[in-house]
Image (cartoon, rainbow, N blue to C red):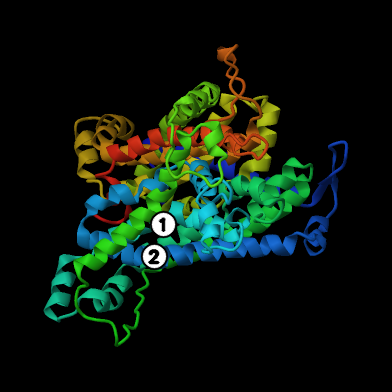
Amino acid sequence: MRKIDKYLFLLALPAVAYLVTFTVYPILHNFFLSFEEQDIYGNLHWVGLGNYEWFKKDPYFPNIVGNTLLYSLATPILDVLLAIPLAVMVKRLGGRWLLLIMIPAFIPPVTSATAWYLFLNPSFGIGYYLMQWGIIKTNLMASKWTIVLVNVWWTLPTAVLLIYSGLKSIPKSIEDAAHADGVAGPRKLFMIDLPLIAPQVLTAFVLTMLSGLFTFVPIYIGASQAGPRILDNLVYYAFDKFFSGQPGYAAALIVVMTALSTVLSMFYVKFLTSRAFVRLPAPSFLPSKELPKKVHYALLVALLAFTFIPFFWLVSLSFKSPLELIRIPPSIFPEHPILGNYWNAVVGGLPFLMTSGAVAVINTLITVLLASMLSYTMAIHRLGGRKLLAYNLYLNATPTIIYIIPLYFILKVLGILNSWWGLILTYPVMTLPYNSWILYNYFTNFPKQMEDAALMDGMNRFKAFFKVILPLSRNGLSVAAVYAFLFSWGALIFPLAFTYTPYDLGNPLSFRGAQTYSVYISMLMSPTTRGYGTVSAAGIISIIPSLTLLFLVRRNLERFWGSR
């Protein structure tokens, strides 16, 4: 048995200890809780398999399972089918277009969902004209396919990036050989490119499937517009059941989701480690020549239109007066632009903004530090071997709903519910596994000679990491930091579960009250408030930090998904 260097152990220990504490315990807690039921006094009683047996009696369960299957299958299928030709388009036209294509992936999920629901509103949005012109016959705000639409809009850029990076990583010698054999265009894509980039295609499929399987935000925004249980999936239903006083039944639903994510992640890890080569038959009708550039530009125009249409409507609404917002038919452009909506969004949302910004920055620093320490030991020194890597990949395949119930009770015992400290303690559950994966890919190609030189100069591995490795890893750390900030800034499910009032500006040092800006936006989308002008302005404000960071790291994005 190989002896572990104590300094490597110390580097990995904080992240491993956190992950074990805040992921293993919740999974076990949910399992045991699923055999209990809460009475009207809040006491838990053993009911055995009663919660699982209720699946057969629950009148909503068949619809919820059907919705879950629809979201989890339609999203990845549409994503991958669209992402492959779009990735080819980006490769042909140049990676400079990635910046615009990636924009939806960097938008807070609650803003994405809000933008589409405002756009499709049958009374005050473009949905009015779509119905008047006969393009659609039903109210899309109550449609399950609107959830799929929002999911695809948000996840498609990541699928394109993954597949594009795979295409860019194909060795030039293979490209030259294909050219010499006269194989090009769609035929080359099927015969050569897709088999070589099967891992990237599978990764895109799995990630977007997980997004569809465990989608929450679009349903949370849409439920207030469509009515109860119409759009629910397992995640939203479990969340609702827990906070309506049925933690045992919620835990049973979560156990089912845990099993699903476990099976999916095991298949994913097995495929990636098997180095399987997938051959695809090329239909005889496929041409063996490059498509004209005008075809690729047409694809680009269609994609950019799909990307920016909800943005345009969000901007338009943000400058409309209250009277103009409820005018029927709705005006496309604001006739008398006002800035009052932005003033309301800043002044009314100030405590929410402060919490979101502070918690996101603190969590980003914590996450990047812990993830870099763990990832370096895993990638360079193979600490933990395949088991630790597989567990990290598994955590990336688990939904955050799995942790809600146990973490809620932990924060309640610690007395830090509805505080900044509660969010800071729990947010790394969302960000640490993903950042560890990003940085593992980065450090896999990091020159170990840098550490060797530092050791020859008399440093130990701990000091070498902080004085040499970290300063030389700015590119990798910057992208990891952007993703950590993005997840933290746009988080909704944890703030909804663990907070219930905005930050107390009257007693700022208490750090009590921790509702975030995403919660504020979702509150404004309530049918009882209908603050569509303010919510549009708030949505635009929420986009600014994310897009700023995207612009700053635009040159480093594709490096972390297989392209070098």
Please tell me the numbered disc located at residue 82. 2
Please tell me the numbered disc located at residue 83. none
State the residue position of label 1. 156
Residue 93, given in percent of the width and then of the height, sits at: 21, 59
Question: Which one is in front, 263 or 76?
Answer: 76
Callout 1: 10 Å neighbours few (<14), some, many (20+)? many
Q: Amino acid at mark 2?
A: Leu
**CA distance for labels 2 and 1:** 8 Å
Residue 560 visible within the image: no
Q: Earlier in the sequence, mark 2 or mark 1?
A: 2
Q: Amino acid at mark 1?
A: Leu
Left or right of 406 on screen, residue 91 = left
Left or right of 49 on screen, residue 297 = left
Question: Which one is in front, 546 or 364?
Answer: 546
Residue at 60% over, 65% down: 69
Determine whether the residue tagged by mark 2 lies in a helix, strand or loop: helix
Residue 224, given in percent of the width and then of the height, sits at: 66, 45
Q: Are marks 2 and 1 in contact (CB under 8 Å)?
A: yes
Question: In this view, which residue lies farthest toward the right?
Answer: 40
> Is the C terminus in the top left, top right, bottom left or bottom right quadrant?
bottom left
